[in-house]
Amino acid sequence: MATHHTKMLIIGSGPAGFSAAIYGARALMEPIVVQGLQPGGQLTITTDVENYPGFKDVIQGPWLMEQMQAQAEHVGTRMMWDTIVSVEIDKGPPFRAIGDSGDEYIGDTLVIATGAQAKWLGAPGEQQLGGKGVSACATCDGFFYRGKKVAVIGGGNTAVEEALYLTNHSDDVTLIHRRDELRAEKILQERLFKSNKISTLWNKTVVSFEGDPADGGLTHLVLTDTVTGETSTLEVDGAFVAIGHAPATELFKGKLEMDDSGYLIVEPGTPKTAIPGVFACGDVMDHTYRQAVTAAGTGCMAALDAERFLATLEFAKQEAEAAE
């Protein structure tokens, strides 16, 4: 067992964690990134990325994360292949975290970049056809379905927003909901029902996603009527699962403020949590945008605020010493 000390401890990788590391390293904070169960975050399971600034051609999500990690290491970040299993943040700074390896990580500041995961149905074919017609992010992948037939599965705000967004690319959008009324806000429902590009299938659940990942991808959905039990099919080129996201905040329950969905609460317009020196960035605190570029931006903000926090502590220490 070993103890690792740093001026900035980052839990989680992905665009937020790596961006925080890059800015922290350039500020000579010698950050440590504990990568977690999915090094690189959600982009490592995303194939084509066409909306990250700076690339005129389509790039691959795993490649982008490799480049971010390499840049963070190049400027002085230490990458640790470990998963944090417990944290002690109420007595800090410094803040203490224990890895699955048994190693102890001590950070003068703590940046939480553990991200969020899209909720999936768990239906056959869903994971096999991921990136081949099945997605959990219309704003990420909707562009690839221009002029094609698409479906959105869900009935809350996320599902309705995804369906409305997809009308920018498709004239044939079907919203599939397992009940006979939506849970989304009324104003969103009004916009949905006024659209002549969206049709709704009520009382339907997706039994399976059908198609060949090696030959064209998704071709159709198999549906079951929740009232009659009748089975039907729906031919689509793309299907977007929009039943919500689950932020990876289990570690911080009872330690940091969260909203009803489990997202960490920060001071508006900043990555600052209620505990001075603890910052949250990326999808773990953002349930609205959830894009790689916005995650990277909040990672940058977390690092800059962490640097200022330490500078303030150092100034206060010097003032106290001078007054003695």
Image (cartoon, grey):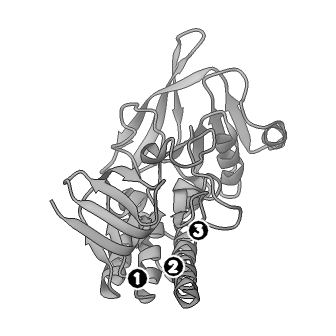
Q: Give coordinates of residue 227: x percent, y percent.
A: 60, 10
Instruction: Give the position of the N terminus as an image quadrant.
Output: bottom left
Q: Which residue is mark 3?
A: 294
* Residue at image point 78% right, 38% down: 185
Q: Which residue is mark 2?
A: 310
Q: Amino acid at mark 3?
A: Thr
Distance of label 2 from label 1 (alpha carbons): 10 Å
Distance of label 3 from label 2 (alpha carbons): 25 Å
Mark 1 falls on what kind of element?
A: loop
Kindly indicate whether the residue at mark 1 contacts the one at mark 2 (C-beta within 8 angstroms).
yes
* Residue at image point 62% right, 53% down: 265
Q: Give coordinates of residue 320: x percent, y percent.
A: 56, 83
Mark 3 falls on what kind of element?
A: helix
Q: Would you say 3 lies left or right of 145 here?
A: left
Q: Amino acid at mark 1?
A: Met
The tag earlier along the polypeptide, 1 or 3, is 1
Numbered-mark total = 3
Label 2: how many Cα within 10 Å (few below 14, some 14–19, many 20+): some
Residue lying farthest to the bottom in this orientation: 322
Q: Give coordinates of residue 268: x percent, y percent.
A: 71, 62
Residue lying farthest to the left in this orientation: 1
Instruction: Give the position of the C terminus as an image quadrant.
Output: bottom right
Q: Amino acid at mark 2?
A: Leu
The tag earlier along the polypeptide, 3 or 2, is 3
Q: Which residue is mark 1?
A: 29
Label 1: how many Cα within 10 Å (few below 14, some 14–19, many 20+): many
Kindly indicate whether the residue at mark 3 contacts the one at mark 1 (C-beta within 8 angstroms).
no
* Residue at image point 73% right, 24% down: 181
The tag earlier along the polypeptide, 2 or 1, is 1
Distance of label 1 from label 3 (alpha carbons): 23 Å
